[in-house]
Image (cartoon, helix red, strand yellow):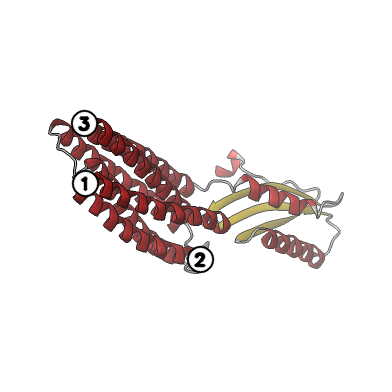
Amino acid sequence: MQVKALLKLSVVVAVVTIALKTLAWWLTDSVGLLSDAMESFVNLASALFAIAMVTIAQRPADDDHPFGHTKAEYFSSGFEGLLIAGAAFGIIWAAVHRFYDPQPLQALGWGLACAVVSSALNGLLAWRMLIASRQHHSIVLEADARHLFTDVWTSVGVVVGLGLVSLTGWIWLDPVLAIGVALNILREGARLAWRSVDGLMDTAVEPDVRAQIDRTLAQFAHQTIRFDHLVTRRAGQRRFVDMHMHMPASWTLGRAAALRADVEQALMSEVPGLRASIQLLPSDVEAHFNDPKDLL
């Protein structure tokens, strides 16, 4: 299933879980279940924003964006992190008020049943999205999947906690649970926001992708051919590699260019979404690379 299709499914699931969790809160008047419902509203907003960003990221390169628009995905992750932080503070505010003004809980059985069903839906969707995120190298899907997993564990904690409230009658556990939920999703929001910032800073490709690149270059290893100054970066679903390829100065330009084309094609076939740029140099020439003198 493609990235956008999964995000649209995420919107549908978010609407269903909002309905179930809101019903659970309405039946029980539990601030813990209210916090769980608020997180689902974040899921919905995040999924809608993610669809918009993926649509932008899929636009082809143009004169203003010659390397494409794939970095738009990182804005989705950052936006989701900020939404999560906002929801967390709102939950804490409601929980503190409830802690000082505790209220008896109603119809816990039906409320917990709604919470369990919504958690099962979120868990199945998160599992599918995490698998797809690895296949498509999509930070949008990964961010959504990890947030949904956090939502699942949040719901599990709320269900277990409210079960204890039902058994013990300690209604003060309800706002304490809500604050615990808020702190947990606040941690997840901070992680997502940092992931967005990290992606916008042109980080290197993943270790497994770098290993694929090295294995491919090893196929062209020869005493007259040498690769160096290899650097990589990632931008959303795209991967980029730049390097120097040294070969005998006696080779014709046509022969050197043909070998470079073979190397680039092999790299891009091995790593889907990779763009390879190779600079040709004679074997006895060393180019400057990251030399501070080049900035003068």
Q: Are marks 1 and 2 in contact (CB under 8 Å)?
A: no
Residue 231 lies left or right of residue 184; in this view the side is: right
Q: Secondary structure at mark 2?
A: loop
- Packing grade of label 1 (10 A; few <14, some 14-19, many >=20) is few
Q: For the C terminus, which image quadrant?
A: top right
Q: Going from the N terminus, do you reach mark 1 or mark 2 first?
A: 2
Identify whether 48 is placed above or below 40. below
Separation (CA) of disc 2 from disc 3:
45 Å
Residue hosting label 1: 107
Disc 2 vs disc 3: which is toward the camera?
3
Q: Secondary structure at mark 1?
A: loop
Residue 10 lies left or right of residue 293; in this view the side is: left
Q: Position of residue 214 (x, y in %)?
A: 72, 49
Is 222 or 153 nearer to us in this picture?
153
Identify whether 60 is placed above or below 223. below
Q: Which mark is residue 2?
A: 2
Residue type beneath disc 1: Ala
